[in-house]
Image (cartoon, grey):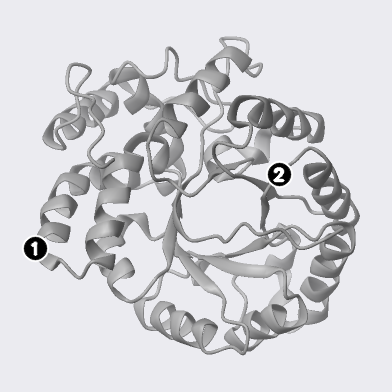
């Protein structure tokens, strides 16, 4: 094995997973969805098998099939980042090895949900989890930092130690949910002997988060508005606050469409938005997630119009 050259920064959308009426994966729709996202010139990669793809409801075999199909569609045009989301460290290692064999460019590593019962008090658990993954693959890793409220976030000392112990960790997908902690993490990660990037997933306050110094973003909303996200990131990188605020004004209605309570419906809503925009045929989700009601779907449509997104006006904001 050898360390790959993919550098996780810039705009990395997380794709959705389309299902048919029987809740089987709709592979044709998935291929079309990947092509739709990949058509946005300037994105840095596409993440699969993440929250946006309802990874909690995918079998291991379905996750593996998603890797194969994604690589078949994207080839080497756009880097593929594969989510590693499992309760088993042994299975995590096997998934990482499989992703590398199939040509993935990076991994997004989730914390095992079992750690909600006190994993922050036993950092050796996550060290072992990462060891199993890095022993099996030398792909660049994006480490998922969960919200404080989830009881799955890593204490700052643990986060920094993970980056020191496992040099293939090249970025943190940060959803910590606290502005003070978010900024400190960005600064501390940049100050490491081998600096580590921050990819924000604070999509509900994206402008403020990017302005703190993030190196990019990784977000399910990129399945719908990757072009707007890219324009915002570029404006912030250029130091053009006026342009950034104007772009953010277009993004804000999509925040209300996707991220209002309950938050767990965010990716269901993104599917509905793509149907309304003519970019996906159906918006089936696997239970326990449920289809939004008619009133909410109508709201999503209104918010898309306020954002300047309609079936007749789906243009790419940033090339």
Q: Is residue 152 visible?
A: no
Q: Give SS at disc 1.
A: helix
Choose top left, top right, bottom left or bottom right for residue 150.
bottom right
Q: Is residue 227 visible?
A: yes
For residue 104, the mark is 2
Q: CA distance from mark 1 to mark 2?
A: 38 Å
Residue located beneath label 1 in the image: 242
Number of dots carrying numbers: 2
Location of the N terminus (image quadrant): bottom right
The residue located at (62%, 90%) in the rendering is 193
Residue 12, horizontal then vertical, whole percent = 47, 49
Residue 22 falls left or right of residue 185: right
- Does residue 218 lie above or below 256 as drawn? below
Residue 226 falls left or right of residue 20: left
Choose top left, top right, bottom left or bottom right for residue 138.
bottom right
The residue located at (28%, 29%) in the rendering is 296
């Amino acid at each position: 094995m050898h360390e790959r050259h993919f550098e996780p920064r810039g705009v990395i959308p997380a794709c959705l997973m389309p299902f048919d009426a029987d809740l089987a994966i709709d592979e044709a729709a998935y291929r079309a969805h990947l092509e739709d996202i990949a058509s946005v010139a300037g994105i840095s990669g596409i993440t699969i098998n993440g929250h946006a793809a309802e990874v909690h409801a995918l079998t291991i075999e379905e996750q593996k099939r998603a890797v194969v199909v994604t690589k078949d569609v994207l080839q080497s045009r756009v880097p593929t980042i594969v989510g590693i989301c499992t309760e088993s460290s042994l299975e995590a290692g096997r998934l990482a090895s499989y992703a590398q064999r199939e040509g993935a460019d990076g991994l997004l590593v989730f914390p095992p949900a079992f750690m909600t019962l006190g994993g922050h008090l036993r950092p050796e658990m996550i060290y072992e989890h990462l060891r199993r993954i890095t022993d099996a693959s030398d792909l660049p890793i994006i480490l998922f930092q969960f919200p404080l409220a989830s009881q799955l976030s890593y204490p700052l000392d643990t986060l920094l130690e993970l980056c020191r112990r496992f040099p293939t960790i090249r970025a943190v997908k940060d959803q910590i949910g606290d502005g003070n902690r978010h900024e400190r993490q960005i600064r501390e990660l940049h100050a490491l002997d081998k600096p580590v990037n921050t990819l924000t997933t604070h999509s509900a306050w994206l402008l403020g988060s990017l302005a703190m110094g993030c190196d990019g973003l990784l977000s399910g909303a990129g399945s719908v508005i990757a072009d707007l996200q890219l324009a915002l990131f570029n404006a912030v990188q250029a130091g053009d606050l006026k342009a950034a605020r104007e772009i953010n004004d277009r993004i804000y209605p999509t925040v209300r469409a996707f991220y209002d309570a309950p938050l767990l419906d965010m990716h269901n809503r993104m599917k509905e938005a793509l149907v309304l925009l003519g970019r996906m045929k159906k918006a089936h989700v696997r239970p326990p997630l449920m289809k939004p009601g008619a009133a909410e779907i109508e709201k999503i449509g209104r918010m898309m119009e306020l954002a300047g997104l309609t079936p007749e006006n789906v243009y790419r904001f940033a090339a």
